[in-house]
Amino acid sequence: MLETKYTHIAEKIKSKIFEGDYPGRLPGVRTLAVSFDVSPTTIVKALKTLQDSGILESNGPSGTFVSTAGRRGRSRHWTIGVLGMSYLSGSKSIEFMEVEKIALRFKYNTIAFNNTDSSITQDPEFLQKLPVDGFIFSFSALNKDIVLALRRAGIPFVSCNRIDDIPDVSWVDYDSEQGLVDVMRYFVDGGHKRIAYFGCDNPYNNFTSKLQKRYMETSEQFGIYDPALFYARCTHQELIDRYGDRAIDEYGVMAGDFLGSLASPPTAVYCHHEYFDSLKRGLAKKGLELGHDVSVIVDTPAGVDFTGHVDGRLIIPFIDRARTASEMLFEHIGDLNARSKQLLLKKKLIVEEQNL
């Protein structure tokens, strides 16, 4: 493509901006024309090119200013990257659709990456080069190397998972530990003493270890602790590698078979709703019917219909998390000096159609 004089001047002005020669308000058109030895008309066209790319912002009679993207030394791409909210099939999750909705409000596009492609999601250099203005990370996709790389590149980001071991990272997540305590208290109030927890082992940020500690503390508070009732034997990736599409079915049956074989089986279980059917089959092998012989409360994303026979549901605020993360990200995109934020969202326990 033939380079015109004004695009050449635009590149020169952009270089000076990225080098810090123009930190705020640019000199006037005539001053720039003299500096670059071109006509004012050429300068006007060059400035318009840089405004269209998001590097400059015009403030009418006050002049032309370097934008937030320009101060970062990057062109604005009007796109954000989202990691971990798309399915392997290519379909969109309800969280990703909420991010898209918020992005459109700011006139931004979105691009999604699935966490299973580690060559992309775990490559800091690749992420630095993507034509995006910021990232939202979900399902434990963020690590220290990526944080350092994005900070060096001046690219803002927000995590949809709690981050305790890296300072000053903006994140929003569910308060899973308090949700577990709420469920256990409900069961104890109902007279249960054999309360089981069933889920995957999630090593990210010591999630399962923290949950297990809270389970132990709460159980000991009521004098009912039995470590065998906390069942989290395999990570999600281990299950996928071992069983593929049958991962949920195999793991639920495995857990039900183990819990049902205990000398004193559980009288109540807390698990994710996706495991309900397979856990039910596993317990049935031991003569126990989930939902009747064994009470159950399931984690259920907000907006997902679940028809299993349960005592209650702990509602996961998926959409609220996506909305909050998006709003945090756009605050960082718009303000280089915005302070980091950390927020835990409450899971709501619904029993017999009543909010507790």
Image: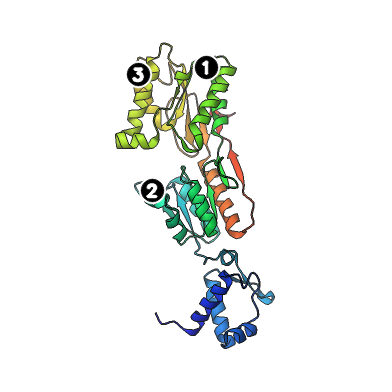
- Residue to which mark 3 is pinned: 284
Real-space CA distance between mark 1 and mark 3, rounded to the nearest whole angstrom? 24 Å
Q: Element type at marker 2? A: helix
- Residue at image coords 50%, 47%: 144
Residue 118 got which mark? 2
Alpha-carbon neighbours of circle 2 within 10 Å: few (<14), some, or many (≥20)? few
Q: Which quadrant would the C terminus be assigned to in this image?
A: top right
**Closest to the observer: 122 or 341?**
122
Of mark 1 and mark 3, the one earlier in the sequence is: 1
Residue 288 visible in the picture: no
Q: Residue 317: horizontal and vertical position, in percent? A: 53, 39
| 176 to the left or right of 260 | right
Q: Residue 89: horizontal and vertical position, in percent? A: 34, 47
Q: Element type at marker 1? A: loop
Q: Element type at marker 3? A: helix
Residue 338 visible in the picture: yes
Amino acid type, mark 3 = Ala
Q: Residue 164: horizontal and vertical position, in percent? A: 56, 40
Residue 17 in the image: above or below residue 111: below
Amino acid type, mark 2 = Ser
Of mark 2 and mark 1, the one earlier in the sequence is: 2
Residue 225 got which mark? 1
- Residue at image coords 57%, 70%: 19
Q: Nearer the viewer, mark 1 or mark 3?
A: 1
Of mark 2 and mark 3, the one earlier in the sequence is: 2
Real-space CA distance between mark 2 and mark 3, rounded to the nearest whole angstrom? 39 Å
- Residue at image coords 57%, 22%: 217
Q: Nearer the viewer, mark 2 or mark 1?
A: 2
Residue 66 in the image: above or below residue 183: below
Alpha-carbon neighbours of circle 1 within 10 Å: few (<14), some, or many (≥20)? some
- Residue at image coords 39%, 52%: 120
